Image (cartoon, grey):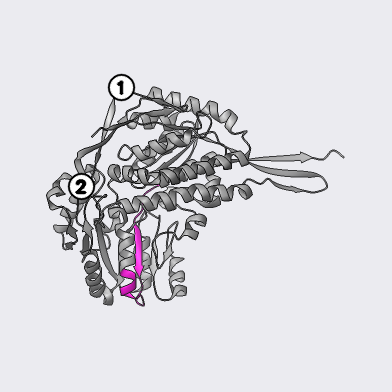
Amino acid sequence: MSVGRIHLLINNEEVPTETYREVRDPGRLSDVVGLVAKGSTQHVGMAVEAAHQAFLSWRKTPLHERMALLKQAASLLEKEASDLAVMVSRENGMLLSTTKLEITHLAISAIQNTVELAETFFQETRVEDAHSWVSVEKRPIGVIAGIVPWNAPLVLTMQKVAPALIAGNTIVIKPSPFAPMGVSTVLKKMAALFPPGVISVIHGDADVGKALTSHPLVRKVSFTGGGRTAAHVMRDAADALKSVHFELGGNDPAIVLDDANLEEVVPKIAAGVFRRSGQVCFAIKRIYVPQHLYDSFHAKFCEYVDSFKIGHGLNEQATFGPLNNKQQYQYVQDLTTRLKNSQATVTHLGTKLEPDNWENGYYLQPAVVRDVEPGQEIVTCEQFGPVIPLISYRTEEEAVEMANQTEYGLGSSVWSADPDRALRLARELEAGMTFVNGHGQTPLGYRHMPFGGVKQSGIGRENGEVGLAEYIEYHAINLHRTT
């Protein structure tokens, strides 16, 4: 079986390099999915220069033309969805069904929603009196550096590309080395719809990332990933005082109230925990349960989780896939080992679909942890894997206090048969987003809900008009009347 090569994309031209990195299937490590070019700091300079030159004319392109081109991009993504889903699932290990949903519902919607919001968003605001008038216009920023992770690469890429381009900016995307192929393949095809240099794709190691985020012609960095890397990006951006947008990690609490119907909420909470095998920034990372329901919830939750079938992302029987990379796999294993040396009880669940292939991938069984202390590592960290702690509480006030005792603040959820009661508690939580009786956006939420966190979970927001505002500058004009 031949292995494809992915080159850099600069000024709408594929640029080969001297070195290529293997991308291996996390669920079948013996399989090489493809080879991806490893760029240099010189390539970064070429890409940013091309993006800057393109910006000088692209920013003058009428809004309706930018909207039309993005509609074409959405149609292209729709046509490519099936092939892209297979490629992405093979490179990042996620279930094929999950990846298809990511593309057909979320990535395409990210473009379509942006286009639909654009016309009203970019209308000029003007006020006047007898002495003057004031106009407030929204202008593009310039070259945007977009850095995206591996867990949901296409939707997270489109959430940067669509608002950046509709605003008149150009963009240089650096995909994750753990899932670069799908992003690069579709952006190459999309770039052909736009003038050369509007979309560029660069690959490489930390030196390439630093060169991109510190380049003087990059006016803004939009980064989705971990807080440690974000701190480096912020330091790089500081020298030129360029703005940053960060969508970072979370330690999302789910608070189950005593009136919740456990038969109804357990499957929904489990879905919020174990989506993409727990590799989601706003996955539920800890569950707070009333003390008198603790044993019952634990039993029902374990029974449900035990129904998961763990296998390769392309195995149609699989309901649970592998972890993406060795570093994360080892981190979760070590975390679980430390748990077993504490007073906590760890229960590994689920069925192995292909036991003979187990050691050929980053497979872990989902684990449910009980009898943990509120300040224990598994409760306070972002595990980003299939290990979930259950913590008991006596009063709602105690649950809220424990939920807020974190430097993270991305998502959260409250589960109750009484929506009004849940809403009152939801408003007490320190998070950028709170869901009631679910953990994730509805289609309406995805269109209008600003996505992002507080504290160390991020700076700025994605989606909706608030997300569009991340990619513009305000230009105010005040005319003094002379007569």
Q: With respect to residue 460, does 61 lie above or below?
A: above
Query: Relative to residue 346, is residue 422 drawn left or right?
Result: right
Residue at the extreme left of the image, as rendered = 356
Asked if marks 1 and 2 touch (Cβ < 8 Å), the reply is: no
Residue 295 screen position, x and y as percent: 22, 74
For the N terminus, the quadrant is top left
Q: CA distance from mark 1 to mark 2?
A: 30 Å
Residue 265 screen position, x and y as percent: 34, 70
Q: With respect to residue 299, does 72 lie above or below?
A: above
**Which residue is pictured at 38% across the width and 28% down the height?**
8
Q: Nearer the viewer, residue 170 or 9?
A: 9
Residue 232 screen position, x and y as percent: 37, 37
Location of residue 303 by image quarter: bottom left
Residue at the extreme right of the image, as rendered = 483
Q: Which mark is residue 362?
A: 2
**Which residue is pictured at 57% across the width and 42% down the height?**
68
Q: Which residues are magenta?
A: 247-266
Residue 337 screen position, x and y as percent: 15, 53
Report if residue 249 lies within the magenta region.
yes
Query: Relative to residue 306, is residue 459 drawn left or right?
Result: right
Query: Relative to residue 361, is residue 223 drawn left or right?
Result: right
**Which residue is pictured at 59% across the width and 47% down the height?**
118
Q: Nearer the viewer, residue 443 or 376?
A: 443
Report if residue 205 lies within the magenta region.
no
**Residue identified by numbered label 1:** 18
**Which residue is pictured at 51% across the width and 28% down the height?**
196
Q: Which mark is residue 469?
A: none
